[in-house]
Image: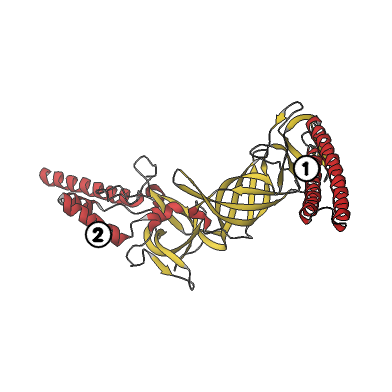
Amino acid sequence: MKSIKKILVVLLLLGVAAATYLYYKQTHQPRPEDLYRLDEITQGNIEQTVAANGTLNPVSLISVGTQVSGIVRKIYVDFNDVVKKDQVLMELDNAIFNAQIAQSKGSVRNNEAAVELAVANEKRMRELYAQEYVSKQELDTAVQVRKSAKAQLETARGLLARDVTNLNFSIIRSPVSGVVVNRVVDVGQTVAASFQTPTLIQIAQDLAKMQIDTSFAEADIGKIKEGQKVSFNVDAFPDRNFDGVVKQLRLNSTNTSNVVTYNAVVSVDNSDLTLLPGMTAYVNIIVDRARHALLVPNAALRYKPKLAEAEQKALEQLPAGERKKDWKNRAGRDGAGREGVDRRSGKGGREQHHGSRELAVGKLYVLKAGKPEMVRVHIGMTDGRSTVVTGDGLAAGDQVIVSELQADGQGKATANNNGPRGPRMF
């Protein structure tokens, strides 16, 4: 009788324990928030931009030089001075030019006297030739001397005009109206114009209209078109955004350490003269935009669920060669690749969508009824943080899996680290 009671007590205890275990399992099911890091699909506007640095420059920057050499004697303008066209900017020492003019004037007078004498001799020879006192050859000689004297007079007059022009060149005048942005020389400095024209002063013709010379990478230049709107800021005014328009795409490229860049010239309205020449501009050009689109974080497109425990053990038991082959097959089947792009199609994971535009195909894992469900989506434009997606069964507010949580509650940076690593794709 006692043994039966003991058995009943043991059975009762086992029943209570089983009921307690079942109750615990039912009331302590892990929530999706405990297993996954989640984010919402949102609906909104998105803009895709390309960025580069550039330098603000005047649209027209005139470098005023000199055609003659000499010592700077007077300077009439300084930095930031407003100048008018033909205004005197500076003067060079004109002593040498005046001496050359005096010499040329003397040469002109000497040749004028020689012409007068030659004309008188020719007249005399013609009279004597008419009376047959001189030969035809002597008359021809007198005519040649008169013509030669006139030619030398013209040469002397030309040299005098050149010396007068050089004297005028010693007075440096402004070729345009504008603002002096740079002055290179000082009083007493010698400028030599032997091989190339030295720059004395730089004048910005109109600072109300400026341009930005940028350096865009060749990967971005295909997205930029003339007339696109530009926003930029400068370090001097970090909290203010300025606007501009793409004015020109220059064909001349620049290759620096095997990095090819192109200059996209941006036209800027600087009517308030806030921007100054030489400022560094941080340029952003809007190349695409979408409104009221479904947006997902980029991390959701990179997420892949880890392998089941049994599948992982079976994979670890395979030889190394078979394991790598199985991993490649799995990558091709599950759409492994950049941004979760589906590689099963022969077009590199891209499908024709909405006419001629090609959209990549990717995967999202949407939480439905507490369980992740894979949904294929078309991937559109991205701004680096969010991506436009389209697909059946998607709606704003849906929860998508970004990563899986570890035992300590932290998300894994890469969702699938199980199995051997595939070959690195460059």
**Residue at image coords 22%, 51%:** 312
Q: Circle 1 is placed at which residue position?
A: 159
Q: Can residue 45 be seen in this view?
A: no
Residue projecting furthest to the bottom: 355
Q: What residue type is labelled 1?
A: Leu
Label 2, secondary structure: give it: helix
Q: Where is residue 199 in the image (x, y as percent from the top left)?
A: 69, 38
Q: Position of residue 17 (x, y in %)?
A: 24, 46
Badge 2: few (under 14), some or many (20 or more) residues near its Cα, within 10 Å?
few
Closest to the observer: 3 or 74?
74
The label number, if any, that marks residue 342 in the structure image: none
Closest to the observer: 373 or 339?
339
Q: Distance between the residues labelled 1 and 2?
A: 89 Å
Label 1, secondary structure: give it: helix
**Residue at image coords 65%, 42%:** 234
The label number, if any, that marks residue 329 in the structure image: 2
Badge 1: few (under 14), some or many (20 or more) residues near its Cα, within 10 Å?
some
In the rendered view, does 73 fall on the left or right side of 325? right
**Residue at image coords 72%, 44%:** 62
